[in-house]
Image (cartoon, coloured by chain):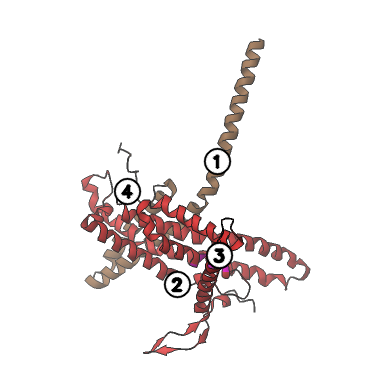
Amino acid sequence: MADPIHQFKIKELIPLEIFETNISYTNSSLFMSLAIIFITLLLLLSIKNKSLIPSRFQSISEIFYEFIANMVSDNIGDKGHKFFPLIFTLFTFLLFGNMLGMLPYSFTFTSHIIVTFVLAMFVFLLVTLLGIFIHGFKFFGLFIPKGVPMIMLPLMIPIEIISYLSRPISLSVRLFANMMAGHTMLKIFAGFIVPLGIFGIAPLMVDVALTALEVLIAFLQAYVFTILTCLYLNESINLH
Amino acid sequence: MKKKLKDFNKRLENLKNLNSKIKNQKKNKNIKDFGVYLKSGVELVSAIIIALVIGIFLDNYFQSKPIFLIIFLILGFAAGIMNVYRSVKKLGFEVGFKKKNDKLQ
């Protein structure tokens, strides 16, 4: 019962197999669908009764919109407005995924590295292809550091390339590790509450505090993922 | 004597103001830096992982067991330190270790 890893188990809800590939509808897919349904509902409800003085739902989506719009224009500039839908989708998807995971009996799909890695790889490929598409061969000037003597270049270029290639790893591992570590920790402390009897109040208090911290982390990690996406996009759009 | 005392009080007041200003600045900075500190650990590890993968792949390709692995691991450490340095120094994701407008000394 107190197995802290058990909560990350993938369960096949609707088993499905096509060409020997398992594409079952799992609890992970269920929560991804739920996240998308909730986002859509929130946004649809908010534009149902448009008014100058916003209703509750309308103010929520206005806050979302302004938050992302500011992030995009601060970090990418005028050319970044094309990417607003992408950034908005990414942020709301991750935020709802993380926050749905905070509910009891729910499943956090961002606590699986394959999910975050696919998202990070998508961002990485987009940024790289976009850079090559816009700047052509000049994009590879990215790997030549400024103000480095010629003799150091054979050493510096591989370092820069490794540093560039490490982006999808750091992007995905950061989100996955934070979500998984937090949920495991919550479960471990929760496992102490009942066996300790009256002294179980101590781990209970820790758990209450950790839950608050986890909500903060859930927001912060979605934010970090999106802001890094913005910074990478900025780099490939406005090449220095 | 009185003049000196007044002068001293003024200077004390100024210093106190300065002190509280610095403290406030530091507080704000700490909150903003939270994200930076949160990500610097992963930056170091991810560069090493990528270097490891490249090294093992090249070794398998050229049948030269430890050589590329060693070379790329060293490069990976360097890249990882570079990543951390950049994120702590707020250089963003520009290449190199200096800001665009800084001249090399």
Q: Secondary structure at mark 1?
A: helix
C-alpha gap between disc 3 and disc 1:
39 Å
What amino acid is found at the position of numbered circle 3 in the picture?
A: Ser
Q: Are marks 3 and 1 on the same chain?
A: no
C-alpha gap between disc 2 and disc 3:
29 Å
Compared with residue A159, is residue A187 higher up or lower down, i.e. above or below?
below
Colour displayed for chain A in the image of the structure: red
Write down the residue under mark 2. A115
Say which quarter of the image contains residue B52: bottom left
C-alpha gap between disc 4 and disc 3:
46 Å
Q: Secondary structure at mark 3?
A: helix
Which numbered disc, 2 or 4, marks the residue closer to the eye?
Answer: 2
Tag on residue B96? 4
The residue located at (41%, 68%) in the rendering is A119
Taken as a whole, is the magenta stretch helix, strand or loop? helix
Tag 2: Cα neighbours inside 10 Å, few (<14), some, or many (≥20)?
some
Q: Chain of mark 2?
A: A
Q: Residue A174: x and y, percent?
A: 47, 62
Would residue B84 appear left or right of A59 to someone viewing this image? left
Colour displayed for chain B in the image of the structure: brown
What amino acid is found at the position of numbered circle 2 in the picture?
A: Val
Q: Which residues are magenta?
A: A93-99
What amino acid is found at the position of numbered circle 1 in the picture?
A: Lys
